[in-house]
Amino acid sequence: MNKYQTVTVLVAAINLMLMMLFPPYDYLSAHNNVPNFDGFLPVFGEHPNREINNNFLSIEIFIVLANAAIASLLLTDRARLRRRLDRQHLVLLGVALNLLLAGTPQDHGYLRSRWSSELLAVVLHRQSGVQVHATTVRRWLKRLHYGWRRARPTLYIRDPRKLQRMQAIAAALADPTPGTEVFYEDEVDIHLNPKIGHGWMPRGQQTAVPTPGKNRKTYLAGTLHAHTGRVITVEGERKDSLLFIHLLYQLKRTYRAARRIILILDNYKVHDSAITRRWLAQNPKFQLLFQPAYHPWVNRIERLWKQLHDTVTRNHRHPTLPALMTAVRQFLHVCQPFPGQQPSLATAK
């Protein structure tokens, strides 16, 4: 075993050790006991309502061992590797690129936070002895189905109340008690300046979307019934506690016979302001269930707002805010029950 094979074995062993120390865990819902991937957690900690995803862990181990075996076999003849890049060595370099791109340049002692083709060429030369041009690296990346794309942000912050809040939401959604109504609640901004988005246009050209110059805004507060899909909204010039209370009052009028009205909502300050708490104290039939912090996907009304922007506000050409709000109201009328309709195909009236 040469030194390159030794390095390959050591890297594989370190990867396996990290996988065993931080295995993938599934979160088990208290409602239906269905596992959902929750992340990579330390094996020695206590993780209630979670279990190790053995299938995922087995796949990880298999991939590391397979890559290590291929690399070890192909690193037996470095002299041939210098003379000619045959098919086997291209496979080896593909494995090496995959392993490099799984991390960042900073893992290898460089200042850059993301890989460039030039830096990949330098590291490949340092690790394998093969000197290639950055253009060749870009061609290999294309064959490996890599593309230069925008990354998506994710948060490492964990809400310590996540488990408790998710259990409360699951219990509310499964509550069969007659007279209990459950809603998702949220607010959305409507801007006169159009949200710019993708659209079909000639290659090499960008469609011009006229803007009014000075932006104006109005705000919607809305609820989505968790079971029927009914949508109720109110409008306001300010996104404050009074707008939220106006929505609560509208729910109270619409669901007079309800014994309990449960709202699943985010941690926005107006939902827990002093004026809101006073109103809730006078209306005890209302119960607020706050979703975990940094978990917007828990609130299904976010999908409604996305559909609203995709259908009405993105790249719109309404010259005035009243004209735009007319289109918004029509969308909110034709989208019900949500989901289930196709508001993006609705005709303007």
Image (spheres, grey):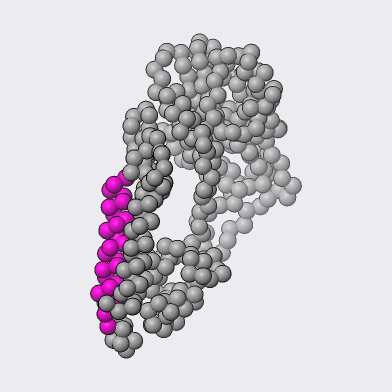
Residue nearer the viewer, 4 or 129: 4
Report the magenta stretch's main SS: helix
Residue 346 visible in the picture: no
Residue nearer the viewer, 37 or 228: 37
Q: Is residue 83 left or right of residue 218?
A: left
Q: Is residue 81 left or right of residue 329?
A: left
- Give me the residue at 53% from left, 71% from top: 110
Residue 172, above or below 88: above
Q: Position of residue 74 (x, y in %)?
A: 27, 76
Residue 16, above or below 295: below
Q: Which residues are magenta?
A: 53-77
Q: Residue furthest right?
A: 214
Residue 293 visible in the picture: yes
Q: Position of residue 141 (x, y in %)?
A: 40, 70
- Give me the residue at 31% from left, 68% from top: 9
- Give me the residue at 30% from left, 72% from top: 71
Residue 344, above or below 23: above
Q: Quadrant of the C terminus?
A: top right
Q: Residue furthest front?
A: 44
Q: Residue 337: say if magenta.
A: no
Number of labelled discs? 0
Q: Position of residue 78 (x, y in %)?
A: 31, 83
